[in-house]
Amino acid sequence: MKLIVLFGVLVLAIVANAGVSMNNPFFCYTTDPIRSMTNMHSTSTSYEAIRRFNFTTVNPYISTCTPSRFWYLGRYGGRYPHAALMQQMIDFDESSIQEDIENNYNAGRTTLCRPDFEAIRDWTRGSDFNLANASLATPAGVEAMENIAGRFQRVFPDLLTSTYSADRFLFRHTESERTNTSIRAFATGLFGAGAQNVVYEEVPEVDWFLRPFDFCPEFTREVENWDDQREAFRQGPEVEEMVEEVNRKLGFQGRNTLDFDTIYIMWEWCRFETASTFEFSDSETGEDSTWCAPFSVAHHLLLEYYEDLGHFYFSGYGVRNQRLLENLNCGPMQNLLELVQSDDDIDVARIFVSYTQEVQSMLVALGSFRDTWPLHQHNYAQQAARHWLTSLIAPQASNLAVVRFDCDDEDDDLIFLLNERPILVPGCDQQTGVCKVSTFVDRFRRFVDANCEEFFCSTD
Ligand SMILES: *[C@@H]1O[C@H](CO)[C@@H](O)[C@H](O)[C@H]1NC(C)=O
Ligand SMILES: *[C@@H]1O[C@H](CO)[C@@H](O)[C@H](O)[C@H]1NC(C)=O
Ligand SMILES: *[C@@H]1O[C@H](CO)[C@@H](O)[C@H](O)[C@H]1NC(C)=O
């Protein structure tokens, strides 16, 4: 009787814990057939993980009219971490962490399943993970870009022809090597070997068009405190509980306890290895990424929220001066407005590759993915179903594509696709997502004749 009661208490304790924080301390990553955490890695989420999960394909018959213009603003494909983070990840690899976990496991202190323990014990970092590759596009990032282009071409073959012509296509990227590599991959996805003839626009030194964030001091001042909410959340009870749980799972206690920063680096490894292999994997759940093992699904969700808070206050609806954030997009917005109204056959397909802030702030300008309440340090639970979920809206290679369809009645259709999926833009049809060109132009008329070089950093 006593034993049963004891057992009952133990089970209850586990169930209660699961109920409160959804944290199962016995979660086994290696044998998990679902791996929903691959979709929870914020801006480092693999594009393919999101797409494959939802079987995304663009429906070309969303409008009954004829596709005639294509406008694409995307982020580069996946990249290696920047040098500072990369160094921390290398230091983590070169620390005693694996031996320490092995000792903990052998002493019976961990709740790791055997396959997860073995994966951690045997883990080695890839030889491509070295400082010379910092910030560069990964092979998976290149693959993602090629595939995106190929799919768009299959949906709109007459618009995105497989033969390149400099009159028809415009390609523009930023100063960084990763956007350069990424846009070339996109061109390869369209033209195959013919991509070597593609002419890319000059990259100006002051590129306020594709990276306005870097050239507007007013904006930099505006978001000075972007990290406050994220940091407050990090110091709050949910993250504290996660740190305790991860330590317990790995068997660390007392003065050996891992701090948040070390656990975060572990998570960086988890999301980097997930995203840098997923594009090449035939499995719906991707390849193994060892350092995901210490985390329960609940932990991934917490870290995802931590990331979302940062983006929300840096390039999302948390930026107090929304007008300034919207106007930063003057260049791309004006370019888009011009394209959707144009009748000549020059540059009918325009491809821009830039950074995540640019794509996120375009969504803000359009008014998409806005939540009723702001995200902040105290409402994690309330925000469980939030629209501002960067893993879905801003993964690696995320992209906003706008297609014009020519209709007989003069007022043409527009569809807005985010990551190959129609999105709802206020003012457009809230069922189908189809928008009328006139509605769109009316709403953004202030950009049509603006002098963007000045307007982009103003609140007019
Ligand atoms: C999957 O599709 C549904 C329905 O269109 C959408 O609401 C949801 O956000 C999508 N999920 C992902 C992971 O893209
Ligand atoms: C990264 O480093 C490895 C080994 O030094 C190299 O083979 C690889 O091509 C590099 N570059 C990229 C972009 O992966
Ligand atoms: C982009 O990459 C190509 C090929 O590596 C190189 O020739 C070109 O100079 C690069 N362009 C810029 C603007 O850096």
Image (cartoon, helix red, strand yellow):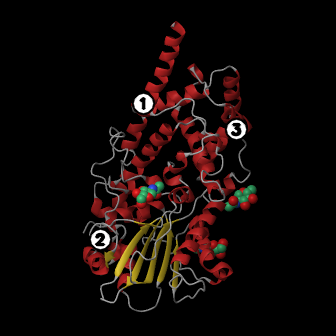
Mark 1 = which residue? Answer: 19
- Quarter holding residue 78: bottom right
Mark 2 = which residue? Answer: 428
Spot occupied by residue 242 in the image (x, y as percentages of width and height): 48, 32
Query: Circle 1 — which element?
Result: helix
Find out whether the residues at labels 2 and 3 contact each other: C-beta distance under 8 Å: no
Disc 3 versus disc 1: nearer the observer: 1
Find out whether the residues at labels 3 and 1 contact each other: C-beta distance under 8 Å: no
**322 displayed left or right of 73:** left
Residue 72, relative to residue 3: is it above or below? below
Query: Circle 3 — which element?
Result: helix
Check disc 3: other Cα within 10 Å, few if <14, some if 14-19, many if 20+. some
Residue 339 visible? The answer is: no
Query: Circle 2 — which element?
Result: loop
The CA span between labels 2 and 1 is: 41 Å
Spot occupied by residue 190 in the image (x, y as percentages of width and height): 59, 78
Q: Residue furthest front?
A: 1
Mark 3 = which residue? Answer: 119
Disc 2 versus disc 1: nearer the observer: 1
Spot occupied by residue 51 in the image (x, y as percentages of width and height): 52, 60
Decide which of 285, 324 is in the foreground and name it.
285
The CA span between labels 3 and 1 is: 28 Å
Check disc 1: other Cα within 10 Å, few if <14, some if 14-19, many if 20+. few
Q: Quadrant of ligand 3?
A: bottom right
The earlier-in-sequence mark between 3 and 1 is 1
Q: Residue furthest top?
A: 2
What is the three-letter code of the residue carrying label 1? Gly
Residue 300, relative to residue 9: is it above or below? below
- The residue at the point 53 percent across, 53 percent down is 45
